[in-house]
Amino acid sequence: MQIVDPAALIARYIEPNPDRPGVDDARLIAYGVPVWALIGHYEAIWSDAAAVAQGYRVPLEAAQAALAYYEHHKAVIDARIAANTA
């Protein structure tokens, strides 16, 4: 298995949302899926990057990029997920 640099994955697949600036609104390039949505499902339902990718119909590397981005911004994204479930 090829090891991919998390920073390279983030650069390739994650972008700021131009309509909603902020770390918690970052999304997948070309798919528009918010990182917080992918992470919310990862934690609540699947706990498997491949299942998240399949569920959202995005490449596995995109789901892995979301997880890598989450690791860098965990507190902010956790707060966003909590606010959405409250």
Image (tube, helix red, strand yellow):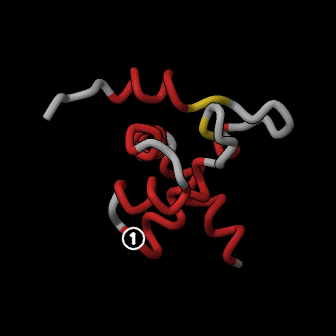
- Residue at 69% across, 31% down: 16
Q: Position of residue 47 (x, y in %)?
A: 35, 66
Determine the residue located farthest toward the left in the rendered image: 1
Q: Which quadrant: the N terminus? A: top left
Nearer to me, 77 or 68: 68
- Please, what secondary structure does the residue beneath circle 1 have? helix
Q: Position of residue 15 (x, y in %)?
A: 64, 29
Q: Is residue 36 left or right of residue 55?
A: right
Q: Amino acid at mark 1?
A: Trp
Residue assigned mark 1: 46
- Residue at 45% across, 58% down: 54
Nearer to me, 46 or 86: 46
Q: Is residue 84 left or right of residue 38?
A: right
Q: Is residue 35 left or right of residue 47?
A: right
Q: How many marks?
A: 1
Q: Is residue 12 above or below residue 82?
A: above
Q: Position of residue 84 (x, y in %)?
A: 71, 69
Q: Position of residue 48 (x, y in %)?
A: 33, 62
Q: Is residue 1 above or below residue 63?
A: above
Q: Which quadrant: the C terminus? A: bottom right
Nearer to me, 78 or 48: 48
Determine the residue located farthest toward the right in the rendered image: 19
